[in-house]
Image (tube, rainbow, N blue to C red):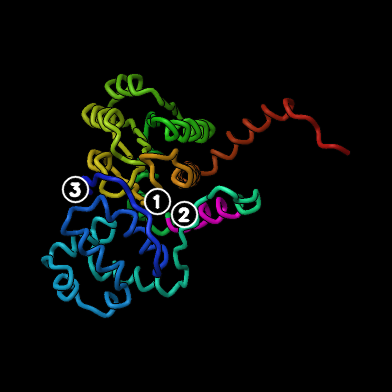
């Protein structure tokens, strides 16, 4: 589904309301001004929003009713009622967001606790953001593809290489490119029946967007793993969108990378299940080829 491009930096904010409010706060700075006013109302009075009809929320934000609906869709929901249901679940979970970044003076134990806590929270949140219909479409596209190419730059390029390894082991023709010039050229040589998985922490990298557009022009399907509403998702056949509370303009993505890797695992397992029982035999032969290269277990 094509969406309007969202630009700008995500911001981190605290306050009650659990994971959904954290997503709203993260995307607020990149929303159009009118939708940002709706976000302000949600962040300031989430319990009030639960008990209020759409028109009341629009009136309090000083926007039109359709703007509230566009706000909900920018977050990945199909409408206001679906958004309210998710908000009710988030508020009822008791999982209030605590912004606990690593600080000078943290002990190694504190550092480990913060990093693991943030990582676990991110994976739980992203699991609830992935659209199951789109996920099914992505798995079907990859399982039926003649050739799969994974594109990424920077840390997302490393994720692309990991994806190539996982799909290569399934016996599929899979390659990865993390150089902008190379995947730009490779995209022009694709054909109908091929598939590209474009991975980006921001969804705003010009070279990656260009390669995705070239792949579509060549007739290939493009699966985008990127933030909601980003320009990369607009040129994709299937957009697997999620928002992570992380400033990717300044810091190397950390929890975003974990979410990308987990989603690649979901895709590879889904494709493996679609390929059927014959895959098990091929995987067993691959394991056999590695046994002689490992030290035996101690007695």
User: Mark 3 or 2 closer to N-term?
Assistant: 3
- Tell me: residue 120, above or below residue 205: below
Graded by Cα atoms within 10 Å as few (under 14), some (14 to 19) or many (20 or more), the crowding at tag 3 reads some
> Residue beneath label 1, please?
244
What residue sits 64% from the left and 50% below the top? 107
The secondary structure making up most of the magenta span is: helix
Q: Nearer the viewer, residue 295 or 241?
A: 241
Determine the secondary structure under disc 2. helix
Q: Which mark is on residue 122?
A: 2
Determine the secondary structure under disc 3. loop
Location of residue 115 in the rendering, given as x and y in whole percent from the top left corner: 55, 50
Magenta range: 113-125
- Tell me: residue 182, above or below residue 22: above
- Name the quarter where the C terminus is drawn: top right
164 on left or right of 110: left
> Residue beneath label 3, please?
4
What residue sits 30% from the left and 36% below the top? 222
Location of residue 112 in the rendering, given as x and y in whole percent from the top left corner: 61, 50
Q: Nearer the viewer, mark 3 or mark 1?
A: 1
């Amino acid at each position: 589904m094509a969406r309007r491009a969202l630009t700008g930096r995500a911001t981190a904010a605290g306050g009650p309301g659990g994971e959904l409010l954290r997503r709203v706060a993260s995307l607020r700075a990149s929303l159009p001004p009118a939708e940002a006013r709706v976000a302000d109302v949600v962040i300031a009075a989430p319990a009030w929003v639960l008990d209020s009809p759409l028109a009341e929320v629009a009136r309090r934000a000083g926007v039109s009713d359709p703007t509230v609906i566009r706000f909900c869709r920018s977050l990945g929901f199909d409408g206001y009622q679906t958004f309210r249901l998710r908000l009710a679940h988030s508020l009822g979970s008791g999982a209030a967001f605590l912004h606990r970044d690593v600080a000078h003076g943290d002990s190694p134990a504190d550092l480990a606790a913060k990093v693991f806590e943030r990582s676990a929270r991110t994976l739980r949140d992203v699991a609830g953001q992935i659209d199951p219909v789109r996920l099914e479409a992505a798995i079907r596209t990859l399982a039926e593809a003649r050739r799969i190419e994974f594109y990424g730059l920077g840390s997302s390029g490393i994720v692309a290489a990991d994806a190539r390894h996982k799909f290569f082991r399934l016996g599929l023709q899979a390659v990865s490119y993390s150089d902008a010039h190379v995947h730009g050229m490779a995209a022009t040589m694709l054909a109908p029946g091929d598939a590209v998985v474009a991975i980006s922490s921001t969804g705003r990298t010009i070279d990656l967007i260009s390669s995705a557009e070239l792949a579509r022009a060549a007739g290939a399907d493009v699966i985008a793993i990127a933030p909601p509403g980003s320009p990369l998702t607009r040129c994709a056949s299937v957009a697997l969108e999620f928002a992570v509370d992380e400033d990717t303009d300044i810091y190397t993505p950390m929890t975003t990378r974990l979410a990308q890797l987990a989603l690649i695992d979901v895709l590879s397992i889904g494709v493996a299940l679609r390929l059927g029982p014959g895959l098990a035999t091929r995987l067993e032969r691959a394991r056999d080829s590695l046994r002689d290269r490992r030290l035996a277990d101690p007695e």
